[in-house]
Amino acid sequence: MTQTPHTLEFYWDFSSPFAYLGSTQAEALAARTGAKLVHRPMLLGAVFKAIGQVDVPLLQWHQSKQRYFYEDISRWAAYWNVPFKWPSRFPMNSVKALRAYLAIPEERRAPFAHAVFRAYWGEDRDISDEGVLGELLGDDSKEIFAKCATPEIKNALFAATKHAIDNGVFGAPVWVVDGEELFWGQDRIVLVERALTA
């Protein structure tokens, strides 16, 4: 009997450093486990607002916890050997980038997402700037930006964010296995993998 592959939903926003780190491992995790990877972009600020969380939680933390946070995220980047540089612009408005992701054909989405994440968290580029996004999109960027301004794409991002909220997402990244088990954080990948191989 052929076993039905697991589904792995990956909720993320370009504005989250932990989502960036998770994004560098998501495809390999799905490949190792045979899971079907489903990307779930969302507007993290809207999720925070819906659950009564401050918009940028880390800015409210005690200085000692902030210092640990910066060290810890650098350790994870080094562990996975991915570029990381704390951006000079933080927090970042990711609305344009998320809409662009939703506006392009599905086969272009994963490479574009990786490029945007790396531009912001690895190269300290302004991903709210259309010039930067246009470079990452390529020759049809003007057409994509025009599509981003349509109600269809605006509503798609709203619906994607509502989907996250309705399914109990409260941060990024969040991994959901088979629509049931929820795991929060890039540091839960080992538990996600166990759930996918059980």
Image (tube, helix red, strand yellow):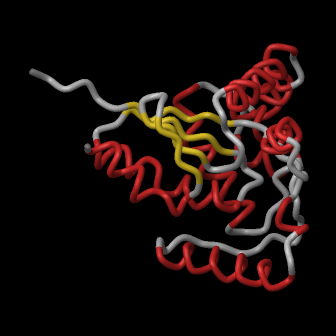
Image spot of residue 191 (x, y percent): 40, 55
Image spot of residue 105 (x, y percent): 60, 25
Image spot of residue 96 (x, y percent): 84, 39
Image spot of residue 171 (x, y percent): 70, 48
Quadrant in the picture for residue 148: top right
Quadrant housing the C terminus? top left
Classify 112 as above or below 148. Answer: below
Residue beneath the point at 49% across and 58% down = 188
Classify 53 as above or below 83. Answer: above
Q: Which of 114/57 is in front?
A: 57
Residue beneath the point at 84% across and 22% down = 154
Residue beneath the point at 34% across and 32% down = 6
Quadrant housing the N terminus? top left
Q: Which of 107/52 is in front?
A: 52
Residue beneath the point at 70% across and 25% down = 166
* Total number of numbered discs in the rendering: 0
Left or right of residue 174, residue 14 in this image: right
Left or right of residue 62, residue 100 in this image: left
Left or right of residue 154, residue 28 in this image: left
Left or right of residue 81, residue 170 in this image: right
Residue extending farthest to the top is: 152
Q: Which of 69/158 is in front?
A: 69
